[in-house]
Amino acid sequence: MFEVAVREISGLILLPGCLFCNDLMVDEKKIYELQAEVVKALANPIRLEIIETLGDGEKCVGELVDILGVSKASISQHINIMRNANVLKSRRDRNNVYYSITNRKIIMAYTIIKEILLESLEDRYRLLQDSFFRLEPIKEVPI
């Protein structure tokens, strides 16, 4: 008999190369492909603005147009991409369709990535400041 490394994370059973969730076996490579689809759906500045805006609650396209200053056609196109990746969901109320984020963890991931970026920018800024203050004054060279 051989031993297999088994891990359980949030109710998911992980075996090398596959994942069990609610008695459903999913190929781990397929999970990577699905993750890549979600990341691709978020990999656009306008879509990130939409995510941040929807973090405050559901909005219709007209509200997003007013808030972001982007055309209705552009907002609709970006929303469709994120809906296809299951990042956004919709709800119809009479003449309006309201969009919201499918899972609050998407906002958490977005926030963490933004924090990492801001920390990195702060580190770069400090390095530039340190380098600038260590430079010797420029000496004039006679012509």
Image: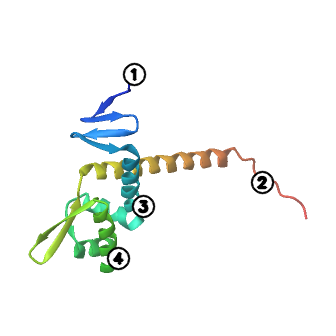
What residue do we see at 38% from left, 60% from top? Answer: 42
Question: Residue 23 got which mark?
Answer: none
Q: How far apart are the alpha carbons under marks 3 and 4? A: 15 Å
Q: How far apart are the alpha carbons under marks 1 and 3? A: 43 Å
Question: Residue 138 got which mark?
Answer: 2
Given contact means CB atoms under 8 Å apart, are the residues at marks 2 and 1 in contact? no
Q: Which residue is mark 1?
A: 2
Please, what secondary structure does the residue beneath circle 3 have?
loop
Instruction: Answer few, some or many: residues within 10 Å of disc 3's Cα (few below 14, many 20 plus, some between 14 and 19).
Output: few
Given contact means CB atoms under 8 Å apart, are the residues at marks 1 and 3 in contact? no
Give the label, 2 or 1, closer to the camera: 1
On the image, the x and y values in percent for residue 136 come to: 75, 47
Question: Residue 43 got which mark?
Answer: 3
Task: Answer with mark 3 or mark 4, whichever residue precedes in sequence.
Answer: 3
Q: Tell which residue pokes out farthest to the front in this image.
A: 1
Closest to the observer, 11 or 110:
11
Please, what secondary structure does the residue beneath circle 4 have?
helix
Circle 3: residue type: Ala
Q: How far apart are the alpha carbons under marks 2 and 3? A: 43 Å
Q: Is residue 44 left or right of residue 67?
A: right
On the image, the x and y values in percent for residue 28 come to: 38, 43
Task: Answer with mark 2 or mark 1, whichever residue precedes in sequence.
Answer: 1
Q: Tell which residue pokes out farthest to the top in this image.
A: 1
